[in-house]
Image: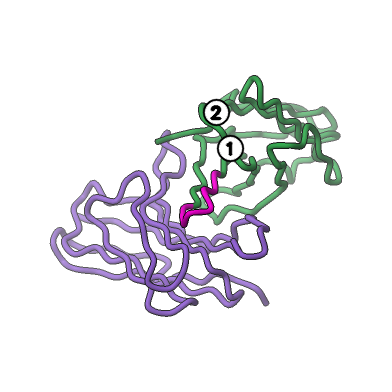
Chain colours: A purple, B green
Amino acid sequence: EAQVTQNPRYLITVTGKKLTVTCSQNMNHEYMSWYRQDPGLGLRQIYYSMNVEVTDKGDVPEGYKVSRKEKRNFPLILESPSPNQTSLYFCASTSIGRASYEQYFGPGTRLTVT
Amino acid sequence: SQQGEEDPQALSIQEGENATMNCSYKTSINNLQWYRQNSGRGLVHLILIRSNEREKHSGRLRVTLDTSKKSSSLLITASRAADTASYFCATALYSGAGSYQLTFGKGTKLSVIP
């Protein structure tokens, strides 16, 4: 089954404690992306990756890091989380090569930073 | 930056009625996509319309695109209670030089009353 998986689904952590949210897709998609969703603000792109070892900032990259060492994985790293990073996070992927552009979304990770 | 802006922010209709949501954007695009999100869950792709298309249908969905006005509309005909969800438009811009960005609006929350 074609899917994007994220782990963990729920996470409560404390300010400053480094964390990683994993994202994996099984569709051989070149493009992967991270978004955060906050009430009243919609989805905002954090980082995206056009392919392995190619990443770029989205609209709200501050406080986040990403890496793309393998095509299927695109982890989101919060080196020193702060309460303003409490949010619902989504990973997504799409095929740029086949020009389909339809994004497949993961189920979301609800992060609370206290 | 937020590109698409949906209107209205919230819409409540009776089952069987049609629902129309609008999206306006600011810059040039390659395509415009509509997504649906059930409460707190991942987004699901509904339909994509390319910049050289004016209208597209998929089942009970009809999407129009007016690039001169930089606007799009999503029409859901004969609505059902199961259509209750948030709907987002997303504008896509692919530079071909290694950049592809999909920018989401804040969404329209649709409630269909049985």
Relative to residue B21, is residue A110 depicted above or below?
Answer: below
Q: Please state the horizontal and vertical placement of residue A106, each as a whole percent of the image.
A: 52, 64
Residue at the (58%, 62%) spot, across then down = A94
**Amino acid at pointer 1:** Ile
Relative to residue B58, is residue A8 depicted above or below?
Answer: below
Q: Please state the horizontal and vertical placement of residue A39, each as a whole percent of the image.
A: 41, 38
Q: Residues within 10 Å of mark 2 (few under 14, many from 20)?
A: many
What chain does badge 1 belong to? B
Outermost front residue: B97
Give the side of residue A57 with respect to residue A17, left or right: right
Q: Which mark is residue B25?
A: 2
The answer to whether marks 1 and 2 sit on the same chain is yes
Dots 1, 2 in contact, CB < 8 A:
yes
Question: Is residue B96 on the magenta stretch?
Answer: yes
Residue at the (41%, 56%) spot, across then down = A89
Report the residue marked by disc 1.
B29
Q: In what quadrant of the picture does the C terminus of chain B appear?
A: top right
Give the side of residue B72 with respect to residue B79, left or right: left
The quarter holding residue B52 reads top right
The quarter holding residue A99 reads bottom right
SS at circle 2 = loop
Magenta-highlighted stretch: main secondary structure?
Answer: loop
Question: Is residue B72 on the magenta stretch?
Answer: no
Residue nearest the observer in this picture, A30 or A6: A30
Residue nearest the observer in this picture, B93 or B111: B93
